[in-house]
RNA sequence: GGCCUGUUCGUCCAGUGGUUAGGACGCGGCCCUUUCACGGCUGAAACACGGGUUCGAAUCCCGUACGGGUCACCA
C-alpha cells in the first residue's frame, strides 16, 4: 500500500532502525531521560521543573539527559523558540548532554533530535504497522468526525473514533483505493486491540500501579501532512532514543494506555513512566495550572528579568520536588545542590502551589551566603541585560560596587536583604552620586519632616570632625559624645529615664544621618555605610545639607 | 458526563497502626539593637467528611464531597 503522504525515504525496516539506534552502552542502572518541548513561543517554568527532575535523575545514575524538539505541528511553531529554550536551560545549569546543543547544532548518536527531521523514521514504523494490520488509512473529513461526535452524544456513548464508530476501520481495499484515487486527504490510524470492557494495569514510578480501561480509540498516528502525532512520535522516539524513564506532566496519564498499547504492538519493551504533577496557582477559591497566558511567573523569562539568582530558582524547585531538600540544605551549607539526590519514587502526587514568598526566602538565604564578588558578578551580568543604565554605574568602579555589596556581608550573620538583582538599583542607588542627587527633593522633604528636628550646626560639626580612620567603637564613642553636646541621649535607656532633658536619643541622631547620607531612614549599619561612601562623599553630603 | 487522579497548618513538605501530629516559608509577640535586615525565643495555625477494620487510625478498606487532568489531524 503506497500513499502520497509517505516520503520516498520512508523505507527503513524495523531491524534497520534497531541497528542504527542500538541500545546504549551505559552502566547498570543508568537512566536515560529527555525533555521534549514543542517550540511554540516561550519556555514554561513547568518545563524547567521537568528538566530539572529528568536531568538529575539521569546524572545521579550515570545516565544521559537529552533534548528533543517536538516540532511536529508546524502551524503552532514560533521561530526562535529553540534558541530560547536552550538559553533558558543553560541559564539554570540544565543544558542537555545530547540533542540540539545549540540552535541547529546536534550532538549524540540517536538523532536527528528534531522530530520534523525524523519523518522517514516515523513513516517507516507506520508502514510496518500497516503491513501488520495494526494501522489503516482513514479518509473521514472534519465534518464527518463532528457528525460522529454529535451522534455519540445523542446515544450517550463515549465520544471518539473507536469500535464500530470507527468508520474506516473495516473498509474494503476497494473502498480505500477509490478514496485514494479520488485524491481524498487521509490520515493513518491505529487499529486498537483493546476490548470493550478490558482493563489494564500500568506501572507509574510515582503512583505505582494504575488501573485503566484498555485503549479502544483508533488514534491518529500520521496526520494528513505526513507528520506524526505526539503519540506515535513519543513511542517511536523513546524507543529508538533508548529512553529508560519518561518523565512528563500528568496530563499524559489519560493517554498512557494508548501509548502502552503501541509499545506492545511494536513489540518493544516500554520505558518506565513518571507522570509528575504540574505547578499550580491559586485562582480564587480553586487552583489551576500556571498558564503562560495569564501568569507572568509561568514564563522562565520572568525569573531572568526579575534577576532571581539562578540557583535560587533551582533550589526553590528542588524544594517542591522534595521538601526534605530544605533540611539537607541546612545541614550542607555551601555544598552544591547537585549533591542532593532526588527520587522519582518519592515525588509528591499532588500538584504544588507556586509560592513567591517562599522563592524569595530561598533566594534571600542564597544571596546572603554569597560573597560580595559573586553577588557583584551575577548582578552585573543581570544589569547588562536588563538595566543598562544601572550596569554602567555599577560596572564603572568594581571595587566601590563590591565594597557596597560587602556591607554587613562578612561575619557569622550576614545581612539578607537582597532577594533579586532587580532590587539593587533602588536599594543601593544612593551610593552613586548622580542617583543621590536625583533623590534630593525627596531627601530634603524627609529631612524637614524628621522629629525631633536636627539642631542647627550639628551636621556641619559632624562633617568637620568626621574621621574615617576611627574603628567602629571609636566612631560610636565619638558620635555619641558629639550627639550629647547637641542634646541627644547616648542611648534609649538614658533618654527614657529623663525624656525632658534630651532632644532625642542616639537612634534619632542616626536617623538624621541616614536621611542626609542615604535619603532614607532604613539603611545597613551606618558606620559601614560611611566607610564605604568615603570621607569626601560623607563630608560633601553633610555640608550640602547643613 | 465517562475515565484517571488528588486532598496533613494559608503555602511547601515530614509522618507508612500507638507522636503533646514535626520542620520550613508567611503571619503575630518578645529579645538583641544606631534604623532596617540578620539572629534568638515564642505564639496562632492542619490530618476534607462519613462509615467500617482494629485494643488503638492522619496512617488500612469502602463511600461522599470538593479540586485537578483527559476525552483533537496540539503537544
Image (tube, rainbow, N blue to C red):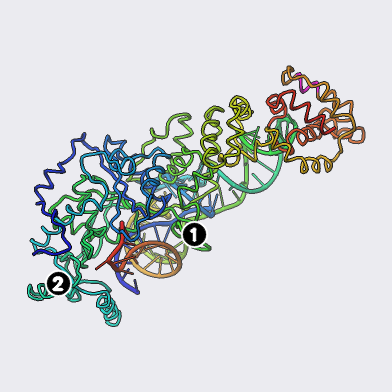
Q: For mark 2, what is the residue?
A: A169
Front residue (pair A522, A352) = A522
Q: Is residue B3 above or below residue A463?
A: below
Does residue A369 appear in this view?
A: no
Q: Position of residue B11 (x, y in %)?
A: 50, 52
Quadrant in which residue A163 is drawn: bottom left
Q: Is residue A52 left or right of residue A199?
A: right
Residue most extreme to the top: A469
- Taking depth in this image into account, of B33 and A103 the one nearest to the observer is A103
Secondary element type, mark 2: loop
Asked whether A474 or A392 is in front, the reply is A392
Residue A272 point in image, percent of width and height = 24, 48
- What chain does mark 2 sit on? A
Task: Specify the quadrant that holds the C terminus of chain A.
Answer: top right
Region in magenta: A474-478
Task: Determine the residue positioned at 44% across, 46% down.
Answer: A320
- Chain letter belonging to callout 1: A
Label number found at residue A123:
none
**Cα–Cα gap, marks 2 and 1:** 42 Å
Tell me what residue is drawn at x 51 percent, y 35 percent.
A381
Quarter assignment of residue A325: top left
Which quadrant of the figure contains the N terminus of chain A?
Answer: bottom left
- Does the magenta portion include A350? no
Main secondary structure of the magenta stretch: helix
Asked if residue A314 lies left or right of residue B61, the reply is right
Q: Is the residue at mark 2 from the same chain as the one at mark 1?
A: yes
Point out residue A324 in the picture as x, y percentages from the top left corner.
43, 40
Reading the chain from its start, which is encountered first: label 2 or label 1? 2
Q: Is residue A228 left or right of residue B5?
A: left
For label 1, the residue is: A294
Amino acid at each position: 500500500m503506497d500513499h502520497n503522504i509517505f516520503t520516498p525515504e520512508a523505507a527503513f525496516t524495523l531491524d534497520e532502525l534497531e541497528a542504527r539506534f542500538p541500545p546504549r552502552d551505559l552502566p547498570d542502572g543508568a537512566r536515560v531521560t529527555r525533555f521534549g518541548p514543542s517550540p511554540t513561543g516561550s519556555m514554561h517554568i513547568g518545563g524547567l521543573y521537568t528538566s530539572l527532575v529528568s536531568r538529575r535523575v539521569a546524572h545521579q545514575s550515570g545516565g544521559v539527559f537529552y533534548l528533543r524538539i517536538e516540532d511536529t505541528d508546524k502551524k503552532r511553531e514560533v521561530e526562535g523558540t529553540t534558541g530560547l529554550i536552550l538559553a533558558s536551560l543553560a541559564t539554570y545549569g540544565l543544558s542537555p548532554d545530547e540533542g540540539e546543543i545549540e540552535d541547529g547544532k546536534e550532538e549524540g548518536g540517536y538523532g536527528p533530535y528534531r522530530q520534523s527531521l525524523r519523518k522517514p523514521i516515523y513513516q517507516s514504523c507506520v508502514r510496518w504497522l500497516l503491513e501488520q494490520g495494526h494501522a489503516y488509512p482513514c479518509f473521514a473529513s472534519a465534518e464527518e468526525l463532528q457528525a460522529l461526535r454529535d451522534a455519540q452524544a445523542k446515544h450517550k456513548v463515549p465520544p471518539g473514533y473507536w469500535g464500530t464508530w470507527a468508520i474506516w476501520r473495516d473498509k474494503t481495499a476497494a473502498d480505500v483505493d477509490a478514496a485514494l484515487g479520488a485524491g481524498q486527504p487521509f490520515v493513518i490510524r491505529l487499529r486498537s486491540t483493546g476490548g470493550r470492557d478490558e482493563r489494564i494495569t500500568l506501572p507509574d514510578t510515582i503512583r505505582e500501579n494504575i488501573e485503566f480501561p484498555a485503549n479502544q480509540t483508533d488514534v491518529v498516528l500520521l496526520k494528513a501532512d505526513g507528520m506524526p502525532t505526539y503519540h506515535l512520535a513519543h513511542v517511536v522516539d523513546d524507543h529508538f532514543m533508548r529512553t529508560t524513564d519518561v518523565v512528563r506532566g500528568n496530563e499524559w496519564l489519560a493517554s498512557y494506555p494508548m501509548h502502552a498499547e503501541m509499545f506492545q504492538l511494536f513489540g518493544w519493551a516500554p520505558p518506565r513512566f513518571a507522570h509528575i504533577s504540574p505547578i499550580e496557582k491559586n485562582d480564587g477559591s480553586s487552583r489551576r495550572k500556571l498558564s503562560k497566558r495569564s501568569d507572568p511567573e509561568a514564563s522562565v523569562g520572568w525569573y531572568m528579568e526579575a534577576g532571581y539568582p539562578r540557583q535560587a530558582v533551582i533550589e526553590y524547585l528542588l524544594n517542591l520536588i522534595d521538601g526534605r531538600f530544605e533540611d539537607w540544605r541546612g545541614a550542607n551549607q555551601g555544598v552544591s545542590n547537585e549533591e542532593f539526590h532526588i527520587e522519582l519514587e518519592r515525588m509528591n502526587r499532588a500538584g504544588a502551589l507556586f509560592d513567591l514568598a517562599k522563592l524569595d526566602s530561598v533566594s534571600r538565604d542564597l544571596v546572603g551566603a554569597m560573597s560580595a564578588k559573586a553577588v557583584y558578578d551575577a548582578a552585573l551580568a543581570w544589569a547588562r541585560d536588563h538595566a543598562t543604565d544601572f550596569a554602567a554605574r555599577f560596572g564603572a568602579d568594581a571595587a566601590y560596587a563590591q565594597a557596597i555589596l560587602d556591607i554587613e556581608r562578612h561575619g557569622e550573620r550576614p545581612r539578607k536583604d537582597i532577594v533579586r538583582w532587580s532590587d539593587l538599583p533602588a536599594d543601593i542607588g544612593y551610593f552613586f552620586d548622580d542617583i543621590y542627587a536625583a533623590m534630593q527633593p525627596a531627601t530634603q522633604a524627609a529631612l524637614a519632616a524628621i522629629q525631633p528636628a536636627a539642631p542647627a550646626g550639628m551636621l556641619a560639626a559632624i562633617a568637620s570632625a568626621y574621621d574615617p580612620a576611627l574603628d567602629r567603637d571609636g566612631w560610636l564613642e565619638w558620635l555619641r559624645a558629639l550627639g550629647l553636646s547637641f542634646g541627644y541621649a547616648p542611648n534609649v535607656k538614658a533618654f527614657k529615664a529623663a525624656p525632658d532633658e534630651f532632644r532625642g536619643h542616639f537612634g534619632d541622631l542616626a536617623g538624621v544621618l541616614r536621611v542626609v547620607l542615604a535619603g532614607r531612614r532604613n539603611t545597613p549599619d551606618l558606620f559601614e555605610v560611611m566607610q564605604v561612601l568615603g570621607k569626601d562623599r560623607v563630608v560633601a553630603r553633610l555640608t550640602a545639607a547643613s
